[in-house]
């Protein structure tokens, strides 16, 4: 069993409820991964994903091996049949099979380049490892999705909702750098599987991949979107249409206390890391309604339920 996207979850409510049970007793399954090794391969930086996945593995008795592939590994070739006479030293075919001999599970983080849309949509690194590895593969954020984050978000929503069908708003916010679409994509896919009133709000030009958004409601007026919201989930992403470009840094989209006033006393969520007073004002991030720290804590239990399911498979 791989965990490449949230479509690998066979029973979402069961996984969320079991993750909450594990949170109450994190060491309940501390022997299930005994004598098993997980290799965490990072092609990009991380704080939460690295530590929470490592912690989750340790809670299950697994031994984690971490490799910062971007700076420590040989530069990998992904194309088949290529003449490797340039900068790439090793083909993913050998690398994935070799790592599979050392590890019982391989987890990979490889962000979008935000240069070549087709290449990013193909999820080159994750797909190649899933193809050539002989052990299960976990997505720790690929070019198009961040399913461990989305599962943690679902756990956080379940713990914090006060009405049966909450209104959840995904709001774009400004950022000086071009950021990937992965978190927003997986959050949208997760909300499409939940019993929620879901609205996406962003400036015109920031439409996400229509194959992800599907029939989810898009409201270009942020104030209208925020009305009566129970959860505000904020994330910046770069343009999908004008691929990888920052086409607006409109400060009026920053999440402020005034905007939160329009909601139904909404909880504030963000996957972190977040730029203070650019994406969200201090007054919101430091408020009682901000649940970002607990959201990050839930990354451990999201990873733990995923690894438990893989180990049981
Ligand atoms: N939210 C998230 O994936 O955080 P890191 O990039 O720090 O892992």
Image (cartoon, rainbow, N blue to C red):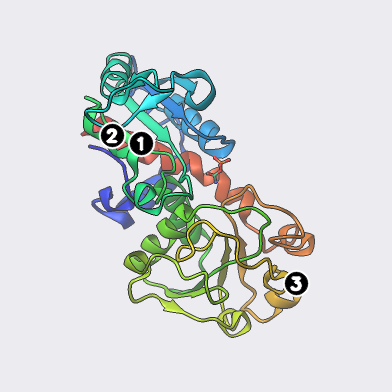
What residue do we see at 60% from left, 66% from top?
247
Front of the two marks 3 and 2 = 2
Do tag 2 and tag 1 residues touch (Cβ < 8 Å)? yes
Quarter of image, res 270: bottom right
Q: Name the residue that disc number 1 marks.
A: 125
Q: Name the residue that disc number 2 marks.
A: 128
Mark 3, secondary structure of its residue: helix
Mark 2, secondary structure of its residue: helix
Q: Quadrant of the N terminus?
A: top left
Q: Earlier in the sequence, mark 3 or mark 1?
A: 1
Q: Horizontal placement of 101 versus 267: left or right?
A: left
Alpha carbon distance from label 3 to label 2: 45 Å
Residue 51's tag is none
Q: Position of residue 168 (x, y in %)?
A: 50, 71
Alpha carbon distance from label 3 to label 1: 40 Å
Q: Position of residue 272 (x, y in %)?
A: 61, 49
Quadrant containing ligand 1 reads top right
Camera-side residue of 83 and 28: 83
Q: Is residue 105 visible?
A: yes
Q: Name the residue that disc number 3 marks.
A: 257
Q: Position of residue 29 (x, y in %)?
A: 36, 29
Above or below — where is 65 with respect to 307? above
Alpha carbon distance from label 2 to label 1: 5 Å
Camera-side residue of 155 and 3: 3
Label 3 packing within 10 angstroms: few (<14), some (14-19), many (20+)? some
Q: Position of residue 102 (x, y in %)?
A: 32, 14
Q: Earlier in the sequence, mark 3 or mark 2?
A: 2
Q: Is residue 24 visible?
A: no
What residue do we see at 58% from left, 75% from top?
203
């Amino acid at each position: 069993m791989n965990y490449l996207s949230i479509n690998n979850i066979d029973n979402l409510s069961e996984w969320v409820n079991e993750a909450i049970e594990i949170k109450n007793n994190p060491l309940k399954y501390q022997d299930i991964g005994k004598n098993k090794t997980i290799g965490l391969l990072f092609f990009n930086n991380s704080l939460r994903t690295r530590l929470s996945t490592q912690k989750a593995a340790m809670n299950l008795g697994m031994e984690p091996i971490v490799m910062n592939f971007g700076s420590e590994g040989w530069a990998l070739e992904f194309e088949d049949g290529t003449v490797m006479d340039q900068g790439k030293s090793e083909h993913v075919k050998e690398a994935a099979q070799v790592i599979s001999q050392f590890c019982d599970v391989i987890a990979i983080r490889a962000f979008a380049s935000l240069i070549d849309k087709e290449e990013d949509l193909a999820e080159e690194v994750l797909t190649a490892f899933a193809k050539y590895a002989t052990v299960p593969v976990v997505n720790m954020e690929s070019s198009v999705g961040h399913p461990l984050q989305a599962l943690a978000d679902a756990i956080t929503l379940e713990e914090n909702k006060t009405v049966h069908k909450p209104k959840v708003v995904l709001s774009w916010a400004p950022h000086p750098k071009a950021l990937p679409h992965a978190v927003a994509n997986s959050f949208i896919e997760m909300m499409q599987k939940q019993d929620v009133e879901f609205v996406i709000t962003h400036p015109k030009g920031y439409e996400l991949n229509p194959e992800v958004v599907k029939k989810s409601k898009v409201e270009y007026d942020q104030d209208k979107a925020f009305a009566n919201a129970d959860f505000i989930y904020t994330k910046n992403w770069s343009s999908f249409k004008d691929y990888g470009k920052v086409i607006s840094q409109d400060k009026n989209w920053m999440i402020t206390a005034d905007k939160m006033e329009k909601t139904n006393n909404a909880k504030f969520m963000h996957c972190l890391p977040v730029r203070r007073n650019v994406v969200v004002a201090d007054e919101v991030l430091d408020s009682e309604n901000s649940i970002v720290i607990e959201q990050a804590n839930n990354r451990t239990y999201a990873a733990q339920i995923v690894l438990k399911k893989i180990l049981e498979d």
